[in-house]
Image (cartoon, helix red, strand yellow):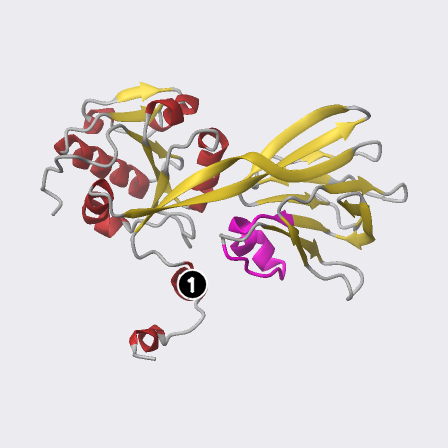
Amino acid sequence: MSSEIIKNPAFRHIGIMGRANKATILTSIYQLCDFFHRQNLPILIDHQTYRLPSMNTDRLGNIEVVERNLLGEKCDLVVVVGGDGSLLQSAQVLAKYPVPVVGVNRGRLGFLADINPDDLPNQLSNILNGSYQLDRRFLLKMEIWQGSHVIYEDMALNDVVLHAGKSVHMLDFNLKIDGLDVYRQHSDGLIVSTPTGSTAYALSGGGAILHPSLDAISLVPMHPHTLSSRPIVVCGSSVIKIRIHKDNRTQPMVSADGKASVPLNQNQRLIIRKHPDRLTLLHPLGVDFFEACRTKLGWNTYAEEFSLDS
């Protein structure tokens, strides 16, 4: 099937992104270019990927190089090579466009990157033949306000994390949801997660796994000082506001999707809410969230039982 020329492909302009300068990632990028060239489909690659130090640009063939923030505008499918971190990075520039994004998993778990690199031509052929499913994931928007001005903003597909940086002291902060007081908490911080991010850092912090279709936000305390402080799940339309208490003794920091942290001071407030943009993920047919949980998280070794008649 990999050598078949698809007459009316579902997508006609293909974008390619890759992040880490790893041999396995470069190998998959070369395979992608070879495959799409055989299909006579135009290929675009972003400047950052094109300029990876070990990239052999001759292996890419006839390809257009564009700025990363233009891929979503010029393509109708973007293939991201890497792990889930690469998909998180792609969300920063692609979420504002309706372009579907599919991941080739060259990372570890790969909850977001579905395509097995060992089955690349076959799965891509199925996608071009129209065998795929779309999945729109919401993101979080974080803003740091000082007075009546926003002094910093960012977006996250997985989570926004309030943390104490390198300090061993706990943070002391107040939390409000939709204008209502929730608690004053002493802890190492707070993970505010989308359903997409519920299988990432929030899971490590003891949060619940949320199905990606849920319109909900999870708040997971990090090592709270009181045993009664538990993760809570609120409506996806909720507005979350965090203020640092005057008795706090260390510098709070905030990070979106693991990017560089920024400070949050006592005269500022952190506001987190649903972002107006969504990321459109493309999955090969047959991809199942619960099957991913079983295999990625090692829930059990008896998957064959699910094939038996009820």
Q: Could one spot residue 86 in this view of the protein?
A: no
Q: Could one spot residue 60 in this view of the protein?
A: yes
Q: Which quadrant: the C terminus?
A: bottom left
- Residue 162's spot in the image, x, y percent? 70, 44
SS at circle 1: helix
Query: Range of the magenta residues?
Result: 192-211
Answer whether residue 202 is magenta in the image.
yes
Residue shown at 27%/48% (left/top)?
A: 117
Question: Compared with residue 32, is residue 226 higher up or lower down, i.e. above or below?
Answer: below
Residue shown at 43%/68% (left/top)?
A: 298
Amino acid on which the number 1 mark rests in the picture: Phe
- Residue 38's spot in the image, x, y percent? 13, 33
Question: Compared with residue 32, is residue 206 higher up or lower down, i.e. above or below?
Answer: below
- Residue 142's spot in the image, x, y percent? 65, 35
Quadrant assignment, res 267: top right
Answer whether residue 131 is magenta in the image.
no
Residue shown at 9%/42% (left/top)?
A: 3
Would you say 215 lies left or right of 24 here?
right
